[in-house]
Structure formats: structure tokens, C-alpha cells
Amino acid sequence: RIPGNEHLDEAAKAARRAALFEPYHDTITRLLDARAARAQPTVLVSVHSFTPVYGGVARPWEIALLSNRDRRLADPLLAALREEGVTVGDNMPYRLTDDGDYGVPVHGERRGLPHVLIELRQDTIAAAGGQQQWVTRLATLL
């Protein structure tokens, strides 16, 4: 399932899958396979963003950390961000699931890699200054 495809006809879905989904995930697979072949330690970090308001309800989290069963990366990041006074969503506003997500379950969980999906609230990264603050903070923590 590819999010955002719900209202597309089958031809449009196939075109989107071929143009965006497959090249993206094929590249990740090749990179992870190469790292595995070199026995190179690897973690998978995926970064997305979420709207500050959804359905008329404000979302208080500045950042969210999403995981499913494997919390090796999410838990220490969660603790570190909270220690810095950051309002963090733990699987909020989204939660990773086996049947609703693809990247982390396929590339992280199936390979046994430590992983986390990071969601940044869009208003915190709208300006270059906010982007740089998050880059610096996350680079340090990771």
C-alpha cells in the first residue's frame, strides 16, 4: 500500500509506483545490501514531517519517534530528547504497523537493523533556521 494512492485509478497508481516507490526502495535495498556485504554496522533512520494541525486539532509534539517492535534506537532517542525538554511523541501522531507501513518494516525490521522513523512537525522546519537546529540536534544524538 502506498499512502496517498487511495483516490488514484490503477494506471496512475502503477505510474506512481514505477516513478517513485520502486526506485526509492530499490536504492535503499542496494545500499543496505552493500553495507551488509561489507559487514558494516548499520542503523536505519527515516525522516518525515507531519502537519501541526490535523482535523482541526493542534498537534503538540515538535518531533515524533515511530517504531513497532524494536525499540533499540527509539527509546534512547526519546529519553535524550525529553531530557532536553523537547515535546516528543512516542508513536504519536502516527504508529508503525506491519500492514500500513513499508520502509521501516521491510528495510529495518526484516533485516534486524536498529531503526527509527523520525517525524518533524512542519512548522518547526519551515524556515532554514529550524531545519539547521534539527539537523544539529539529531546529528548529535544519533
Image (tube, grey):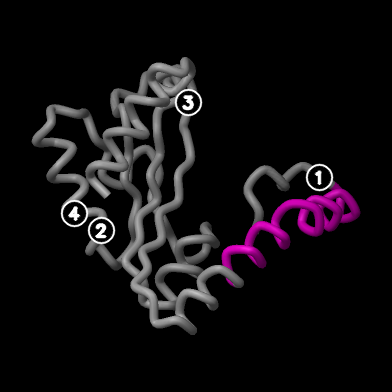
Q: Amino acid at mark 4?
A: Asp
Q: Which mark is residue 75?
A: 4
Residue 71 placed where, x, y %? 24, 62
- In percent of width and height, residue 22 lies at 72, 62
Considering depth in this image, is 28 or 89 the residue closer to the camera?
Answer: 28
Q: CA distance from mark 3 to mark 2?
A: 24 Å
Nearest the viewer among 70 and 55 is 70
Mark 1 highlights which residue? 8
- Which marked residue is nearer to the observer: mark 2 or mark 1? 2
Quarter of the image for the N terminus: give it: bottom right
Left or right: where 116 falls relative to 9: left
CA–CA distance in space, label 2 to label 4: 6 Å
CA separation, marks 4 and 1?
37 Å
Q: Earlier in the sequence, mark 4 or mark 3?
A: 3
* Amino acid residing under circle 3: Thr
Q: Which mark is residue 106?
A: none
Mark 4 or mark 3, whichever is nearer to me = 4
- Which of the two labelled residues, at mark 4 and mark 1, occupies the earlier sequence position? 1
What's drawn in magenta, residue-wise? 9-29
